[in-house]
Every structure is written in structure tokens, then in C-alpha cells.
Image (spheres, rainbow, N blue to C red):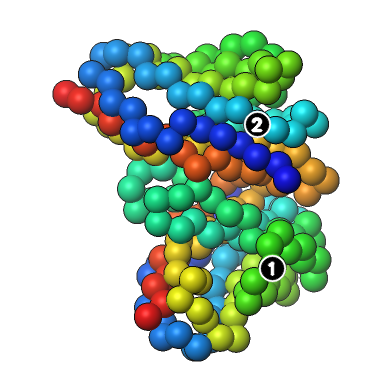
Amino acid sequence: QKEVEQNSGPLSVPEGAIASLNCTYSDRGSQSFFWYRQYSGKSPELIMSIYSNGDKEDGRFTAQLNKASQYVSLLIRDSQPSDSATYLCAVGSGSARQLTFGSGTQLTVLP
Amino acid sequence: SQTIHQWPATLVQPVGSPLSLECTVEGTSNPNLYWYRQAAGRGLQLLFYSVGIGQISSEVPQNLSASRPQDRQFILSSKKLLLSDSGFYLCAWTGPVDEQFFGPGTRLTVL
């Protein structure tokens, strides 16, 4: 059984701070890793993908991957109230490129 | 560019009634397609995936079924809905590097 674990939160940070979201996964054969943002009542939106160990930066977002520790994280710098959402970690594996999702971390950025 | 459509957007159905949800993708050919369900406040549960016309794989036992009659059409069905079938149903397709993109979703309430 492939599992993806996230801190359920909720996580609150003040505006302008760094938000740190963490995720661990059980399947060592996983090859692809994603972060999705989901606003209340909406479908998930892809914000970051990472495939190799290390850091990947895109604007205010940085994804970090450590395959040896089976750990993925997402940093959001200069957090804004518009970043308030649920963040879903997803891990890819399998011949049909299936994704296994974590239960999500609810982030609130306080003005 | 690729677009994914789902309908209806919302649906209220009595227990025991049939269900048909439709998903269509534009702008790509032979995509992998996926059906997910998200219960209130929970992560995404993969229900079915398809790698081609007529090819359906089920991830969890349930009273739902799926079909792929055309390359870019994916249908989720049930003959008799249960209360536990309530949720947010999401269709997704896979991009070139395993990332998945979601449709707008169908919110189903079974009464």
C-alpha cells in the first residue's frame, strides 16, 4: 500500500513569512513528485513538480526532494493572503503514471 | 492548449438512483485519464484510470464503474447510488512528464 503523509495542520503564518509544508512517502520506487494548491470548493491546481534530489525554485515557491529520506517539502516565501489554501502532496509511480495524494495541509496566511 | 471539461458541475441524487458523470479532454490525443473522489476535508482517492479506449483499471472496490468509449472521453457510472458515494469527483489527464491536470469537478450529494 503506497502512502503519502502530510501534516494535516492547519498551519498559520503571518503575511510576508515563509510557509513550510512537508510530505513523506512510502514507495521507494516513486519517480515524480508534485505539489498542488486547492482553494475551497475548487479543483487542485499544479504549482510545482520535482523529479531529482535537491531544490527547485519557481518564483516564491521552492520544492525540495530527498529520495534517501523519502521526503518532499514546499517552501513559500513572502507568503500572501492569496496563498491561503490546502496544499496537496502527490507522488507518482506505476506503469500508468498514477499519483498517490496526501490528505493535504491547510495553510492560512494572516494579513 | 489542452482543456478538460466535466459535467454536470453539481448534482443532487436520491439513494438508489443511477449516475453518469462525463469528462472530455481537448487538445491532446491518447491521454491517460483518471477519476478521483474527494470526500469532504479529505485527500484525493484514485477510483479508476485508463491508458486507452476500452482499457479501465479499478483502484478500489465499489459500486461505481468507468468506461472510455472514445479517446478523449471518460465516463463514471453507477447503477444505484449509496450515501457514501457523496463527494467531489475529479477527472484528470496526464501531461508529458507525469503531471496531472484536473477538470473543474462535479460535486455530488446523495440524499
The three-letter code of the residue at mark 2 reads: Tyr
For numbered disc 2, what is the local secondary structure?
strand
Q: What residue did someone put label 1 on?
A: B61
| Disc number placed over residue A25 in the picture, else none | 2
What residue lies at 70% left-to-right and 42% top-to-bottom?
A2
- Which residue type does callout 1 highlight? Pro
Residue B61: percent from left, percent from top: 69, 68
- Viewport quadrant of the C terminus of chain A: top left
| Residue at image coords 60%, 28% | A24
Left-right relation of A107 to B104: left
Give how far across and how far down residue A53 sits, in percent.
69, 14
* Residue B71 against residue A22 in the figure, above or below: below
Crowd rating for badge 2 (residues with CA inside 10 Å; few <14, some 14–19, many 20+): many
Assess disc 1: are there few (<14), some (14-19) or many (≥20) residues with their C-alpha within 10 Å of its C-alpha: few
Q: Position of residue B63 (x, y in %)?
A: 63, 76
Q: Chain of mark 2?
A: A
Q: Is residue A61 above or below residue B48?
A: above
Vertically, is B46 above or below B109? above
Asked whether disc 2 touches disc 1, contact meaning CB atoms under 8 Å apart, the reply is no
Badge 1: chain ID: B
- The answer to whether B20 appears left or right of B29 in the picture is left
- Same chain under badges 2 and 1? The reply is no
Residue A39 numbered tag? none
